[in-house]
Image (spheres, rainbow, N blue to C red):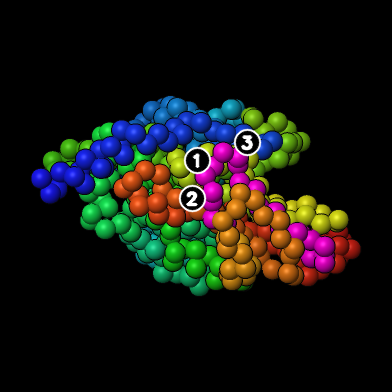
């Protein structure tokens, strides 16, 4: 009798908690949703590229970054503008950890090396954009002295679930057959070490933050048997990168922006990551405005005494908790749907937004919902900024 009561509560949650599914909310002009860090059957994932793209379309995504391990004949094409962009990439395993090289040519690398600095330099030389992958999990990153990576995974789905207890994993395993979206959401944990390291790096230079799905849809059992778990679709519905291209990226239409245009925005930090499975985050606003300039995630702006930071959460969400960090120090922590705060001075400003877990067995735990890329507010005067542009 004892264990039946909690089991019943978990199942009730599974049946009665309705998550938004594929609702996308109201995106800003030029906002595109996608997932980065996907393994296919060309590597050790279980789905072919067309199957993976089909799952991504079902999740209402419009781009995907495919990153099989050390694959040199990636079938994805780069410069082919369409409503669904595939960023060709590669996940490199080095002796110092893994990194993603996105936008590299199909036959790259021709001479793989296990030296992280060599491979980071070669990825850049090949025109790639580089992000450290799961720097605090599995093969943790150890070459922090290397400075030529463009960004890092703050969230990695395959790393985050490992931050749960055995009981949490058990609850999720019971939920999965009934409500796979809620099962995935229950395992969401704040990646504290990644966020702390990000702030440390941001004190030296701009570093773009992303969420990586690390989707395989494959657990390799014994005798070559592959268990397709967790499937691509629930992973693609969970944490997504919202790229902010603006109404006319590079003079074009954001709806058909190419993989190259999307990748450039990712590199510059013109994006935020959101766990859309808890509530659709499209239309989230994180900007600094003054009489001189309006700047969003990834932008540089000169400091002026009348500058304000605005954070606005999409309407309809339950009451969130908004935290704002300036140079790694928390300066705002309040429960509100929006905030408009005077800027205390120059610095690197980024925000995190939390929502409570729905249902009973999430214990209403605050769960990281959105993290923005920083806005860099410089001490330079507007005249100096204009001259340097
Ligand atoms: Zn990896
Ligand atoms: Zn991976």
Question: Which x, y percent locates residue 318?
Answer: 52, 44
* Mark 2 sits near ligand 2, with its Cβ under 8 Å away: no
Q: Quadrant of the C terminus?
A: bottom right
So how many labels did they put on this image? 3
Let me know if residue 131 appears in the view: no
Task: Please tell me whether residue 316 is drawn above or below residue 125 in the rendered image.
Answer: above
Please, what secondary structure does the residue beneath circle 2 have? strand
Q: CA distance from mark 2 to mark 3?
A: 19 Å
Dots 2, 3 in contact, CB < 8 A:
no
Q: Is residue 331 left or right of residue 143?
A: right
Quarter of the figure with residue 19: top left
Q: Is residue 119 left or right of residue 249?
A: left
Tell me the mark number nearer the camera, choosing from 2 and 3: 2
Tell me the magenta residue range: 301-322
Residue 111 belongs to magenta span = no
Seen from this angle, which residue lies furthest right? 383
Question: Which x, y percent locates residue 233?
Answer: 39, 33
133, 184: nearer the viewer: 184
**Residue at image location 43% in from the left, 60% down from the top:** 191
Q: Earlier in the sequence, mark 2 or mark 1?
A: 1
Q: Which residue is mark 2?
A: 355
**Residue at image location 74% in from the left, 65% down from the top:** 343
363, 106: nearer the viewer: 363
* Mark 3 sits near ligand 2, with its Cβ under 8 Å away: no
Please, what secondary structure does the residue beneath circle 3 have? loop
Q: Which residue is mark 3?
A: 27
Q: Earlier in the sequence, mark 2 or mark 3?
A: 3
Q: Earlier in the sequence, mark 3 or mark 1?
A: 3
Q: Which residue is mark 1?
A: 279
Dots 2, 1 in contact, CB < 8 A:
yes
Q: Residues within 10 Å of mark 2 (few under 14, many from 20)?
A: many
């Amino acid at each position: 009798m004892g264990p039946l009561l909690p089991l019943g509560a978990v199942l009730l949650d599974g049946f009665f908690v309705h998550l938004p599914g594929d609702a996308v909310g109201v995106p800003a002009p030029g906002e595109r949703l996608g997932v980065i860090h996907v393994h296919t059957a060309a590597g050790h994932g279980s789905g072919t590229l067309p199957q993976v793209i089909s799952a991504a379309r079902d999740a209402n995504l419009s781009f995907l970054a495919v990153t099989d391990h050390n694959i040199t004949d990636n079938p994805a094409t780069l410069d082919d503008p369409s409503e669904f962009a595939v960023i060709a990439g590669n996940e490199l395993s080095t002796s110092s950890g893994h990194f993603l090289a996105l936008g590299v040519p199909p036959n790259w690398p021709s001479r793989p090396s296990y030296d992280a600095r060599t491979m980071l330099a070669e990825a850049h030389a090949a025109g790639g954009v580089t992000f450290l992958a799961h720097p605090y999990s599995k093969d943790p990153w150890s070459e922090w002295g290397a400075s030529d990576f463009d960004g890092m995974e703050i969230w990695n789905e395959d790393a985050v679930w490992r931050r749960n207890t055995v009981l949490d994993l058990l609850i999720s395993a019971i939920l999965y057959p009934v409500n796979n979206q809620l099962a995935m959401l229950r395992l969401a944990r704040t990646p504290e070490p990644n966020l702390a390291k990000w702030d440390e790096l941001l004190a030296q230079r701009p570093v773009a933050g992303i969420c990586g799905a690390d989707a395989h849809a494959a657990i390799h059992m014994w005798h070559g048997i592959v268990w397709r778990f967790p499937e691509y679709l629930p992973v693609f519905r969970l944490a997504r990168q919202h790229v902010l291209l603006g109404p006319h990226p590079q003079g074009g239409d954001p709806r058909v922006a190419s993989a190259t245009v999307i990748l450039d925005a990712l590199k510059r930090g013109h994006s935020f990551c959101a766990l859309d499975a808890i509530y659709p985050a499209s239309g989230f606003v994180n900007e600094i405005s003054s009489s001189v300039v309006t700047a969003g995630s990834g932008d540089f702006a000169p400091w002026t005494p009348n500058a304000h930071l605005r954070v606005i959460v999409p309407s309809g969400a339950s009451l969130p908790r908004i935290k704002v960090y300036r140079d790694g120090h928390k300066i705002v922590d309040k429960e509100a749907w929006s905030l408009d705060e005077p800027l205390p001075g120059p610095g690197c400003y980024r925000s995190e937004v939390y929502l409570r877990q729905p249902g009973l067995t999430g214990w209403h735990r605050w769960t990281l919902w959105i993290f923005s890329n920083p806005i860099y507010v410089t001490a330079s005067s507007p005249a100096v900024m204009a001259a340097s542009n």
